[in-house]
Image: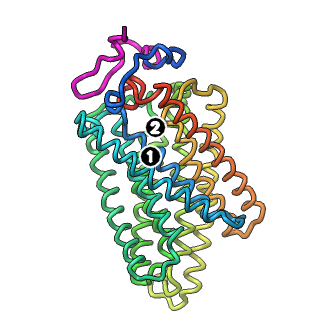
Amino acid sequence: MSNPILLEAYPNGYQTPPPNSSHSETPFMDSKKSEKHAPLDFRQRLRHFTWAWYTLTMSAGGLALLIANQPNSFKGLLEIGLAVYLINILLFALVCSLMAARFIIHGGMMDSLAHDREGLFFPTFWLSVATIITGLEKYFGDNPETAFSTTLEVLFWIYCACTFTVAVVQYSFVFSAHTYRLQTMMPSWILPAFPVMLSGTIASVIAERQPDRSAIPIVTAGITFQGLGFCISFMMYSHYIGRLMESGLPNREHRPGMFICVGPPAFTALALVGMARGLPSTFSVMDSEDSVADGRMLEVLALAAGAFLWALSLWFFCIAAIAVIRSPPTSFHLSWWAMVFPNTGFTLATITLGNAFSSTAIKGFGTAMSICILCMFLFVFVNHILAVYRQDIMYPGKDEDVSD
């Protein structure tokens, strides 16, 4: 007989823990009881295919971008990166198809976006799109066709408009429809601001090959939206640190999500240095006649700010790593991908600073970090597949469609 508690679902497809019980006390969260799970067919499990699945594709896309930026390359590395990029495109198409199938079969798309937990992962879709756009430039940017540069420019402006709308609309909804206690603050609250912040990262990648008429507006928008995303993140950091001081570390199952905080300063450092280098040679400050000196001044300022922010990422990384090592999670959750994507940005920032300072040691350290990222990606990916097979995810009460 299947457990009726496990199969019980609200009409909108969401489940919540019993009143007056913690999330970890529900029968769904005990990984040791996975063999007692009532078997569900694929159609039933598809109801629990959440927006958080895009953490897979944003991480795979980030890995492809990291491979393309390696300071110590070897023959065939670019082809490996291209293969990873194309596989990520296929994964992205698969995830999109399964999300569409979920909503066609079970409905509830607006409920998923409005959910107090799952809705916060909707921006990971746009983070995946950001990695796809930057990958286009990295792997196909030597295309001499003017149409290619124009396509990237159009994609950039569409991305800026969409992600700015997400940052405004989603936070407006969260502020009016949900009540979150600061004692439960998690870095996932930053996610709605993350995609618009990556506008600067995209700008830093595509601006260098753009014609002068396009490069300056792209860099201007990139700096603007990068600043917006980082400032929102920085304000969230104050709540996050306050929560850690008052309530201690999160539950061990949620600790991999602490790595999200590594991302904003790392991607900002990466974007500032890249955009300073992507400005056209004709750029000048306040109609100055010495454009070379102006460009050099901006690069120096970007490097100083980048090193400053890199240290902040390092601090957040160490805090999160110590927390996870002290109490590793006992069962797989999609938040494990936070151990990959934000750290990919941290590694890219390290490589970028190493290239800018022409430091062999820093570039070597960036290569070592890249190997660690690859190993972590494979580790999380294997556990992701096993979790699906074992019904540890895509199962009632086990996914982000359950309120904390």
Left or right relative to 340: residue 227: left
Residue located farthest toward the top when viewing the structure as drawn:
1
The residue carrying mark 2 is: 239
Horizontal and vertical percent position of residue 181:
38, 28
| Residue type at tag 1 | Met
Q: Is residue 5 magenta?
A: yes
Residue in view at x 32 percent, y 23 percent: 15
Q: What segment is highlighted magenta in the picture?
A: 1-27
**Point 31% across, 51% down: residue:** 166
Could you say whether the residue bearing mark 1 is in a helix, strand or loop?
Answer: helix
Q: Report whether 51 appears left or right of 324.
A: left
Out of 383 and 26, give the one closest to the viewer. Answer: 383
Which numbered dot is residue 235?
A: 1
Q: Residues within 10 Å of mark 2 (few under 14, many from 20)?
A: some
- Asked whether the beta carbons under mark 2 and mark 1 sit within 8 Å of each other, the answer is yes
Does 158 sit above or below residue 7? below
Residue positioned 48% across, 44% down in the render: 56
Against 322, residue 223 (above or below) is: below
Please tell me how crowded label 1 is: few (under 14), some (14-19), or many (20+) other residues with Cα within 10 Å: few
Q: Quadrant of the N terminus?
A: top left
Image height check: is 344 above or below 7? Answer: below
